[in-house]
Amino acid sequence: MGPESRQPKISVVTPTYLRPQELGDMLRDLSKQTFLPFEVVVVDCALPENTETEKVVRTLSPSLPFSIQYFGSKRGTAIQRNAGIDAASGDFIAFIDDDVRLEPDYFAQIMAAYDRDTKCEVAGIAGYIVNSFLDPSTSLRWKWYRRLHVFSTYEPGRYDYVSGYPINRYLQPPHDGLREIDYMGSNCGVWRRQAFDEGLRFDPFFADFGVLEDAHLSLCARRKWKLWECGTARCYHYPSPRGRVNSRKLAWKTAVNFRYVFMDIVPTRSWRQEIRFWFVQFLQLGQLIAALGRRGGRAGNLDAVRGKLEGIWAAMHMQQPTPASQKR
């Protein structure tokens, strides 16, 4: 991507559901980029019942410095993003959620980082979410994880292949460099299209709202490619009040989805690895029960405990996933 070559094109893919205000704000925000995307692909799973988002897109489109593809799909962020990948035509595909806002030079910083990948070894580069930083020195949960030696690594953005858990990328303090990571979120990353042309997709196992589908995609890509985090490509996450609210289902997914990823990414596991995985599950269950006691048995907390118990039971009875080579 030297100065003599044509400027690469970025397609932005955004799944949305009943968030017309957030989507409109995101589109306006993207128009401020110093390195503009050439198209935005919006995949709406609320159609045809709800048309408010469609009205926002139709109203804004004429004033935006990029084209918009807007269409409906079945519900599920993994399903929606796969539909967006299939529709996008850029050299790079950026997954930007409708509640994420980018600093004006975000894409410029990402593409400058890709310029440093002279051997074309990097499939995806994640930005740094400034307001999501979780200070490990003040996080009680992560203090206990360290004291109990729960994981074999504590480097943010790495996957602990021993226990089957991704180390929270938000534990990484602000930085100005490039870090190699094992997984990246699907809310502010830019991927090389070649990886998708070779068959990479979100696994349809991850239905409705996402939990760990982005880590699974990344870990599948890591079998061949590298992934980076670019500290100078900065953005902000402002969770929508219309986000997930079902604490029981969310807790269920923290058992079932984590188990699926571990079984698929590490198909052959020792008994020590299995003990590590289940130890973390029951440790998390204990934390939920402790929170239930502290907070007086509120309905949401009780639902989380029930969901975790149901998820652990379901995870214990899961079958080994079909190998990736046979899924496509």
Image: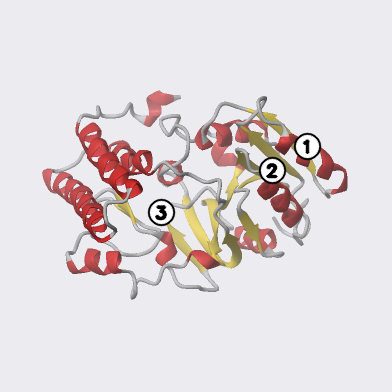
Evaluate if marks 2 and 1 touch, with contact meaning CB atoms under 8 Å apart.
Answer: yes
Question: How far apart in space, not on screen, are marks 3 and 1 (Cα)?
Answer: 39 Å
Q: Is residue 84 above or below residue 144?
A: above
Q: Is residue 246 above or below residue 121?
A: above
Q: In the image, residue 141 lies at what x, y percent?
A: 28, 64
Q: Is residue 325 left or right of residue 263?
A: right
The structure residue drawn at horizontal position 30% and vertical position 37%, both measured from the top left corner, is 256
Residue 55's disc is 1
Q: Is residue 304 above or below residue 316?
A: below
Query: Mark 1 falls on what kind of element?
Result: helix
Residue closest to the eye, 52 or 177: 52
Query: Mark 2 falls on what kind of element?
Result: helix
Q: Amino acid at mark 2?
A: Pro
The structure residue drawn at horizontal position 19% and vertical position 53%, both measured from the top left corner, is 286
Query: Which residue is label 3 attached to?
Result: 182
How would you rate the neighbour count of disc 1 (Cα within 10 Å): few for under 14, some for 14-19, many for 20 or more?
A: few
State whether residue 69 appears in this view: yes
- Name the residue furthest bottom: 137
What number of labels is visible?
A: 3
In the rendered image, the quadrant that contains the N terminus is bottom right
Query: Which residue is label 2 attached to?
Result: 20
Q: Is residue 169 left or right of residue 160?
A: right
Q: Amino acid at mark 3?
A: Asp
Query: Mark 3 falls on what kind of element?
Result: loop
Residue closest to the eye, 303 or 33: 303
How would you rate the neighbour count of disc 2 (Cα within 10 Å): few for under 14, some for 14-19, many for 20 or more?
A: some
Question: How far apart in space, not on screen, are marks 3 and 2 (Cα)?
Answer: 33 Å
The structure residue drawn at horizontal position 41% and vertical position 54%, both measured from the top left corner, is 182
How would you rate the neighbour count of disc 3 (Cα within 10 Å): few for under 14, some for 14-19, many for 20 or more?
A: many
